[in-house]
Image (cartoon, rainbow, N blue to C red):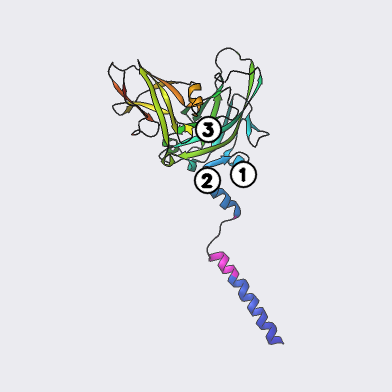
Amino acid sequence: MIHKIAFLIAIVSGLLLGSYFVQRFGPRSQSPYEEVYAQVERQTKFDLSDVGTEDRLRLGGWQRGDFSGFWMTGSSASLEIPIESVSPDGDFLRLGGLLKLKGSEPDATVPVASLRARIGQIQLGVWTIWGDQSFPTHRFAIPGTVRDSDRPLILTFEQIEEGAPRPWRVALGLKRLEFENKSAFKSFRSHLDSCQGSTISGWSMAEDLPIPVDVMIDGVIQPSTLVQIYRPDLKAAGIPPTAGFQLTLDTPPPAGTEVSVVYRGFPDKQIVRSPCKF
């Protein structure tokens, strides 16, 4: 009997000792928290109804909405995004929002709000929202240079207040954001409508959303000023009315200069009917 008890004790001691050595020196498994954190670091799509994402994005200037998203609480708001979500070659940021208006109903072709977006000191552009956009979407081009700094990537939105007070109040919400790698873009649609003086107008699409364009002379991108326009004719043709653009070069080129209009991020891909001459 004593021998059996000693034998059992030896077996139990061996199992406990083996378990200790496996935990101490064997391969280390990730904790559930570490696994979730690693997934968020690689994440490119953020639904703001996800509490974990909310914590990771570190929202500032927002309050939880009744639509699985967040409302802007003032004239500016920000959020921190994982630097790993942006590729070194640059990406596009796709935004989905919600618009509520109180007061008089504006015409569909009237801009009701404009948001200037930037990451740190890098300006991304302006998001103009029109009267008929209850669920506005927008795409910003993000240069890969935003990764050059070790600082967190802080995406900031600032409302642009222009002109006289309008007879409506605007509430802007953010529902989701997604980083799109430009290598995944396969479908492009566009048209260069006119090229007169120093102004170029037309429209451009990549996949299902408008995409910005650049004007190039001899392979060099030219500084230009973008005028946001609403195109009812595009809407009638089944194209987003916000796909239209009107660009004026900051420095008018000499008469007869040939210019190329390219999709932003794709310097070798010209839009339809480009190039043109002033």
Image location of residue 222, percent across then percent down: 35, 24
Amino acid tagged 3: Leu
Q: Is residue 102 visible?
A: yes
Q: Residue at x 63, y 75 (%)?
A: 13
Which residue sits furthest right?
Answer: 1
**Mark found first going from the N terminus, 1 or 2:** 2
Q: Quadrant of residue 56?
A: top right
**Mark found first going from the N terminus, 3 or 2:** 2
**What distance separates the C-alpha of mark 1 from that of mark 3?**
18 Å
Residue denoted by label 2: 41
Residue denoted by label 1: 52
Q: Quadrant of the N terminus?
A: bottom right
Residue denoted by label 3: 155
Q: Quadrant of the C terminus?
A: top left
The numbered disc on residue 262 is none
What crowding class fits label 2: few (fewer than 14 Cα within 10 Å), some (14-19), or many (20 or more)?
Answer: some
**What distance separates the C-alpha of mark 3 from that of mark 2?**
16 Å
Contact between marks 3 and 2 (CB within 8 A): the answer is: no
In the picture provided, is 114 more to the left or to the right than 246? right
Image location of residue 115, percent across then percent down: 54, 25
Amino acid tagged 1: Gly
What crowding class fits label 3: few (fewer than 14 Cα within 10 Å), some (14-19), or many (20 or more)?
Answer: some
Q: Which residues are magenta?
A: 19-31
In the picture provided, is 135 more to the left or to the right than 148? right
Q: Is residue 138 above or below residue 18?
A: above
**Mark found first going from the N terminus, 1 or 3:** 1
- In reply to whether residue 148 is colored magenta, the answer given is no
Q: Residue at x 60, y 54 (%)?
A: 32
Q: Is residue 162 above or below residue 83?
A: above
Q: Is residue 230 visible?
A: no
